[in-house]
Image: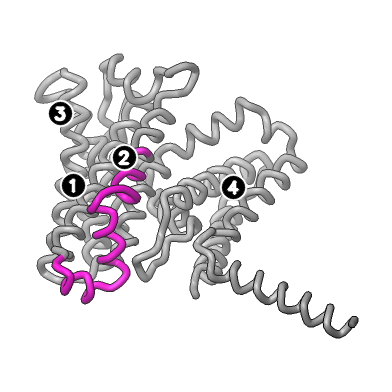
Amino acid sequence: MSEKLATTTEGISLGFKQRLAASDQPWFLYGAFVLLIVGFTIANPIFLSSGNLLNILNQTALVTIMACGVGLVIITGEIDLSVGSVLALSGVSAALFMQDVTENWFLGALAGIVVGALVGLVNGVLTARFLIPSFLVTLGTLSVARGIALIVTGTSPVLVTDPTFWAVFAEASVVGIPIPIVWTIVVIAITWLLLHFGIIGRRIYATGGNLSAAKFSGINTRAVKIFVFVFSGALAGLAGVIIAARGHAIRPDVASGIELDVLAAVILGGTSLFGGKGKIYGIILGSLIIGILNNGLVLMGIDPSIQLTIKGALVIIAVAFGRR
């Protein structure tokens, strides 16, 4: 009887492990999220205060916005390393447009977003049409975009003097929620609708899951890849507009290295580097983990070099857990 019970228990345990391994749910992510909150709260009770939690969401806004775009690119089986430099170039473009062309804040913001989308278009065309690996393409545009930002500004900051621009993208609030968080929610909603509803989402997953099968089924995989790169560039452009409004000025070297946090958020969120797999809620949780990690380590007074080491180790662990 005891042997039969042991066999049954072992079978149930094995079945649970198999279901857990086969599940699309990012269990590692959930566990890491809870453990980080509990750990940092124990280390410093201030961490769980409403003011600090709102601060984390506000600080994470730029990473989350760009992670939504980069996540779609990675689901198609490509990668976008240029978003940090595109952010800088777009912010500079918006500021210079309002300074030299028109004082209209809306047109200035639109100019920044369009510049980001154009860089994304270049990335998409070179990758999809000319079949250059996206790693090399976006590594190149990372340098080119940052270089252009430095050239057009003469390496000096560009002032943003429009109070409406500040308010709409950085300083206003909606029912007590800071406007950067509101913009993040809007971007998440749009990305969620694109990815999980309608034909474009199915084509994105199909392109990343099996490129040859997607082509044979009639999907224009080149157009799909160009679309996701343009979308990623436009969101990096929006992030550039927000960061320009936050500081009332924009430096050409702003947000250097932020693309590492963006990629970490996407990978931590369970998005496969091999394409065809990823969910918007995973990307959001990945971004929050990066924000919580940054905030908590700062509250604990951890050296920045150690922070980088910890984030890098987390990404490696996430990739290891995500491979099946």
**Which of the two labelled residues, at mark 4 and mark 3, occupies the earlier sequence position?**
3
Q: Is residue 192 left or right of residue 220?
A: right
**Which of the two labelled residues, at mark 1 and mark 2, occupies the earlier sequence position?**
1
Q: Position of residue 280 (x, y in %)?
A: 41, 49
Q: Quadrant of the N terminus?
A: bottom right
- Residue 31: name its quadrant: bottom right
Mark 1 touches mark 2? (CB < 8 Å) = no
Q: Nearer the viewer, residue 291 or 182?
A: 182
Residue 84 appears in view = no
Q: Nearer the viewer, residue 195 or 135?
A: 195
Residue at point 57%, 50% (across, down): 304
Residue at which label 4 appears: 293
Residue at which label 1 appears: 148
Image position of 18 with respect to 104: above or below: below
Q: Which residues are magenta?
A: 189-218
| Badge 4 element | helix
Q: Nearer the viewer, mark 1 or mark 3?
A: 3
Q: Position of residue 112 (x, y in %)?
A: 20, 35
